[in-house]
Amino acid sequence: MHTSSPLRVRRAITTTTLAAVVGLAAVACGSDSSTGMSGMDHGSTNPSTSASQHSMPGMPGMDGDMPTGDGLTASASGFRFAPSVSSLPANQAASVRFQIQGADGKPVTAFESDQTKLMHFYLVRSDLTGFQHIHPEMAADGTWTAPVAPLQAGTYRAYTSFITKDSTGKAVPLVLSEQITVPGSASTQPVPAASTTTQVDGYTLTLSGDVKSGMAGTLTVAVSQGGKPVTDLQPYLDTYAHLTAFHEGDLAFAHLHPQGTVNGDHGGPTLSFHAELPRAGNWRLFVQFQTGGTLRTATVTLTA
Ligand SMILES: [Cu+2]
């Protein structure tokens, strides 16, 4: 079903009007509860679709010679991620303002919804700690504002993941990133050893599947609590789990796309993801899922 790059495979088939979505896009994931957000996460109108895609790993991009399959460039396909800051203060809440600029340098204002959001913004530190997943809000002029929780000192990478359109109207899914420095003395940690299991908030996640670098595969995550299968996962971003991965060392980005559709608060115990990791080595996985109205983030290292 999925034949394209790890960058953005899945896109909403419905183009929602900008005005309707901006209001919903303003909530950071950390405080995101789907309850009360009208219709946001309960539909199943966002099936996995294979977006036409040109940025296979190792292949040149359509409009340039930079590969875009790892999310490590600030510009690709004629679009540029332009943050207003290159550093943020340590240990205090802050905002990152940014634009996505077209080849003419003007801010882009037209985006398509992807997993119910027009823009996904991620932060991770060089040692793969400090993960944040935020849904920024866009002003009419195309300036986005991402509210960032307090950061420890260190070197971070900020990623924007979105779908826009090129001059011919063709959808262009991109992940663009820039480095952001948080001054101060940083005590980085070694990336934890690879494991097939991890815990968060009393939940145990067990990974299985055959994931090799540079190849499409399926990663399965089984969720249990107290030894019993969990079957009350709630929809989050139109899925039962949102899985982001970062590569140890260069911080390459991969989004693992959920398979299957969402139907009420009955997700689990087993979730499947289309996995396509562009590099060999260790990947730190951030699995976000929701139960009882609370968003939880489990982390685990996977070696591809
Ligand atoms: Cu997001």
Image (cartoon, rainbow, N blue to C red):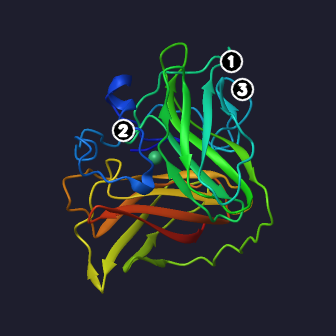
Above or below for 54 versus 133: above
Q: Quadrant of residue 187?
A: bottom right
Residue type at mark 2?
A: Thr
**Going from the N terminus, do you reach mark 3 or mark 2 first?**
2
Mark 1 or 2: in front is 1
Residue on which the image places disc 2? 49
Marks 1 and 2, how far apart at CA: 31 Å
Depth order, front residue of 37/204: 37
- What is the secondary structure assignment of the residue under circle 2? loop
Q: How many marks?
A: 3
Residue 115: where, in percent of width, then height?
38, 42
Residue at 37 percent across and 59 percent down: it is 241
Residue 223: where, in percent of width, then height?
34, 73
Q: Residues within 10 Å of mark 1 (few under 14, many from 20)?
A: few
Residue on which the image places disc 1? 105
Marks 3 and 1, how far apart at CA: 16 Å
Residue type at mark 1?
A: Gly
Residue 278: where, in percent of width, then height?
63, 52
